[in-house]
Amino acid sequence: MQAFEYANPATLQEALPLLGAKWGQADILAGGTDLISLMKDYLHTPKRLVNIKGIKELEGIQKTPDGGLRIGALVTMDELATSADIKTGYNSLAQAAAGIPSPQIRHMGTVGGDLCQRPRCWYYRQGMGLLAMKDGKSLVADGENRYHSIFGDGPAYFVSASSLGPALIALGAKVKLVSAKGPREVPVAQFFRAPKDETTREIVLQPNEILTEIIVPAAANLRTSTYEVRQKEALDWPLAAASVALTMNGNTVTAAKIILGHVAPTPWESAQAEAALKGKSISPATAEAAGKAAVANAKPLSQNAYKVTLAKVAVKRALLDAAKAKA
């Protein structure tokens, strides 16, 4: 990898001045499960690496006065999966974290890193750019696209790699981003974006900011679940996933959030599926109907129509699992 300057701040205030005004000047190192690979492949060539692992204020899971949770950016995926507070009130988050098959990545990877990781698109990973364009035309649309998006109109066809993004959006969570100018809070639903050009990243984080924590509102009376479909049980990224959050009055759904993962450049909310459930009880029939509604507007590419079925099944199974859970 390219030589770089290494900084090891002990506090957030020490770390912020070390960041750059432009991408490429500095990268943030936490678990490193994605960044080190990017650096070895020369996809990221930062002049400075800022190690934030020693910043204690970015650790821990705490309850907030309003009954929600504050999750530090350095919390590992294993800590999230095994936390009693998470498993009790936010089961979909625990399921998403526990679904990562590799014990090594669960113990090293952080929640902040999961949200900020770069796309796994093989065109991008082989240096062809985030949008994989050649002569003004996408290489993805007519190329090897079996693992790419089935929603959206391009030019971005990669899929969001985040395991936690769909569950956090369904829960109405926000992220706190801090720069030397001060903090800002962004809904997780607005944290991800589909780039229109190579100069725009797939998240709204700026090069001079650090994602410091996730704020999850109180989940009273919510029934939640995450269901992922993988090609294999060994280390692999999901082919499709669904995270759901249901507000119930007895057995009747009064409100629903249904977010698909790994099928679009951003976690994909299905308003049609949510509307299909309102006022109904969850049964195999209504869950299947919601799954069909969730993929009604899918636009598969030449090799990935199979993902439409997987996404539909993921929604159905997540809903049936959530309906069994205690609010």
Image (cartoon, helix red, strand yellow):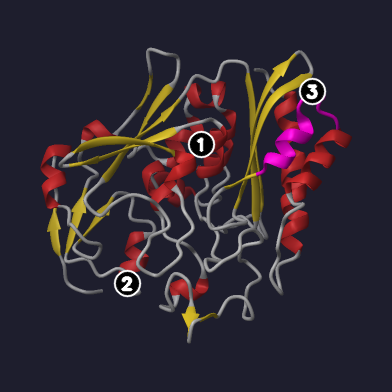
Answer left or right for 109 relative to 27. right
Q: Residue at x 56, y 21 (%)?
A: 88
> Which residue in the structure is indicated by mark 1?
168
Hey, which quadrant is residue 174 in on the image? top left
Q: Residues within 10 Å of mark 1 (few under 14, many from 20)?
A: many
Looking at the image, residue 236 lies above or below residue 178: below
Instruction: Between residue 292 and residue 275, name the one nearer to us.
Output: 275
Image x and y of residue 249, in percent = 73, 14
Indicate yes or no whether the magenta region holds residue 92: no
Instruction: Between residue 297 and residue 106, name the one nearer to us.
Output: 297
Element type at marker 1? helix
Circles 2 and 3, Cβ within 8 Å, touching? The answer is no
> Which residue in the structure is indicated by mark 3?
279
Image x and y of residue 74, in percent = 32, 39
- Between the C-alphas of marks 2 and 3, the distance is 52 Å
Q: Amino acid at mark 1?
A: Leu
Hey, which quadrant is residue 87 in on the image? top right
- For the C terminus, the image quarter is top right
- Between the C-alphas of marks 2 and 1, the distance is 31 Å
Instruction: Between residue 257 and residue 326, name the one nearer to us.
Output: 257
> Which residue in the structure is indicated by mark 2?
40
- Between the C-alphas of marks 3 and 1, the distance is 24 Å
For discs 3 and 1, the disc positioned in front in the rendered view:
3
Q: Amino acid at mark 3?
A: Gly
Dot 2 or dot 1, earlier in sequence: 2
Image x and y of residue 144, in percent = 62, 78
Q: Residue at x 77, y 31 (%)?
A: 277
Q: Amino acid at mark 2?
A: Lys
